[in-house]
Image: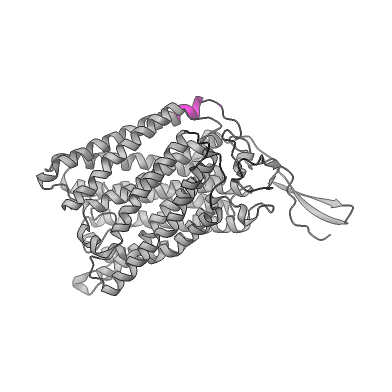
Amino acid sequence: MTLEIQRDSSSEKQVVTHSVHYHAPWKWYDYFTFNIDHKVIGIQYLVTAFLFYLVGGLMAMAIRVELATPDSDLLDPNLYNAFMTNHGTIMIFFWIVPSAIGGFGNYLVPLMLGCRDMAFPKLNAIAFWLNPPAGLLLVASFFFGGGSQSGWTAYPPLSLVTANTAQTLWVLAIVLVGTSSILGSLNFVVTIWKMKVPSMRWDQLPLFCWAILATSVLALVSTPVLAAGLVLLLFDINFGTSFFKPDAGGNVVLYQHLFWFYSHPAVYLMILPIFGIMSEVIPVHSRKPIFGYKAIAYSSLAICLVGLFVWVHHMFASGTPGWMRLFFTISTLLVAVPTGVKVFGWVATLWGGKIRYTSAMLFAIGLLSMFVLGGIGGVTLGTAPFDLHVHDTYYVVGHFHYVLFGGSVFGIYSGIYHWFPKMTGRMLNEKLGRIHFILTFIGTHLTFLPMHQLGLQGMPRRVAMYDPQFTSINRLCTIGALILGLSVIPFTMNIIWSWMAGKKASDNPWQALSLEWTTSSPPLVENWEVLPTVSHGPYEYGNGHSHQAQPNITPEVSA
């Protein structure tokens, strides 16, 4: 990209305009290189994360098949522990967080802001390329010690005495992923704060960008705390220190505070970008302006703030004093308020809308129903007396998966169906999309709803062998898990076939109003030939608005 300086004869001042020189569109092999284009990096994140999703999903299916019977008859107990640990690790750190923030965030934020790339393109590429070696370390842990077996929380003293080499590789993998998250978050904050097109006011910023901004601030505050705790754990495992060794004066509860100070906000790192996707998909496919734009935007910032003060509700069973239980019960219930604001805004947007039941919309509505159910379970777990009753039972597993699978994964699917035409220039097959939705919706309920009953009856989580009285419900959950596994097949077929030979998409197949739809599908290497100007908000449907691409004049410079 070059800058041309032209003289304005009427004012005798110089103005700077952008003139862009393009090279040929990216080839398939460019996606395997150190590429600094934010769109390439976004797709690199999405594809890599989906591959890890397949690995984590196969682990989950093996776990559920093992749990179809009370005895240990498929997986060796140590391998079961390793699968349980790494399934959770992969799904959180290598699937949901990278795809929601790294994938959609990188691809969409510059396009939505009307700029040509992220603020720090090389830093952006570095952030992605920290993920593949982290994944290799995680896979290598199975060949050096049989895999980490201490759960995705890696609580000491268990993590100090089981499979030390594998546990070390696990810690290094998470530290690398955390570093990637910090670098990416810094890039998002600067990009959103400084690089939106000059004609865009803050109250015209797409809600997805508000969500990414809140997510990035949350990651910058919380992720270094987890990294510090894991480094101390690494020293305890390998160098004889005693930060968390109880027999040498260490404090295991301190580790829990360090871990959960990040890992409960991590729930919001996984769901806030999905909330942003919901706020983009629902208005477009219901053809209505978003209800309560400012309330939804500010609620993302409120979740970011309050979300930093709820972590101890994971530790109610750790001997926390009464005053602390009371404080964190209140803060946990309080964080439901801004979340409820979003849900109310989405429902109000749907009400009376001209809804198009596309695959993207089906997954968005499915997310709305499942997240509300999961949120109700979260409110019950946020109260200390009930939490103590069901702590470490399958009630927690059911709630957690309703929020993250029924929430985050449904949102990722919705986003893919919505923006796939923009990313590839091809339309996904809607018939396969509906089959995918039906299988996923049924499989999710069948797998995770019965787990609440298991938990209320007292079945502990993270065990391969259990009392035979729980057999029938576990078999129901296993059938649901197999349906979920099957649901990935039509989705994968749809993605591959449509990308290669699907129906060609127009530049704006959904008639949306946000800026990413003003460029070609797929976008040019530098996004636009001429940067767009913003004359209205991104959700003003029904008012006859359309974006106009006009030259963008940067602030004047003196002659």
- Percent across and percent down for residue 343 are 44, 50
- Percent across and percent down for residue 136 are 36, 47
- Please give left or right for residue 19 compared with residue 58 in the image: right
Q: Quadrant of residue 411?
A: top left
Residue pictured at 40% horizontal, 32% vertical: 491
> Is residue 242 depicted above or below 489 in this figure?
below
Residue placed most toward the observer, 103 or 550: 550
> Is residue 166 depicted above or below 525 in this figure?
below
Residue pictured at 38% horizontal, 32% vertical: 436
Figure coloring: one colour
**Quarter of the picture holding the C terminus:** bottom right
Residue placed most toward the observer, 69 or 336: 336
> Is residue 419 depicted above or below 315 in this figure?
above
Q: Please say whether residue 504 is one of the residues in the magenta stretch.
A: yes
Residue 49 visible from this viewpoint: no
Q: Please say whether residue 304 is one of the residues in the magenta stretch.
A: no
- Percent across and percent down for residue 70 are 12, 43
Range shown magenta:
496-505
The majority secondary structure of the magenta stretch comes to: helix
Residue pictured at 36% horizontal, 63% vertical: 332
Residue placed most toward the observer, 331 or 176: 331
> Is residue 162 depicted above or below 535 in this figure?
below
**How many numbered discs sit on the rendered protein?**
0
Residue pictured at 52% horizontal, 39% vertical: 353
- Percent across and percent down for residue 22 are 67, 39
Residue 410 visible from this viewpoint: yes
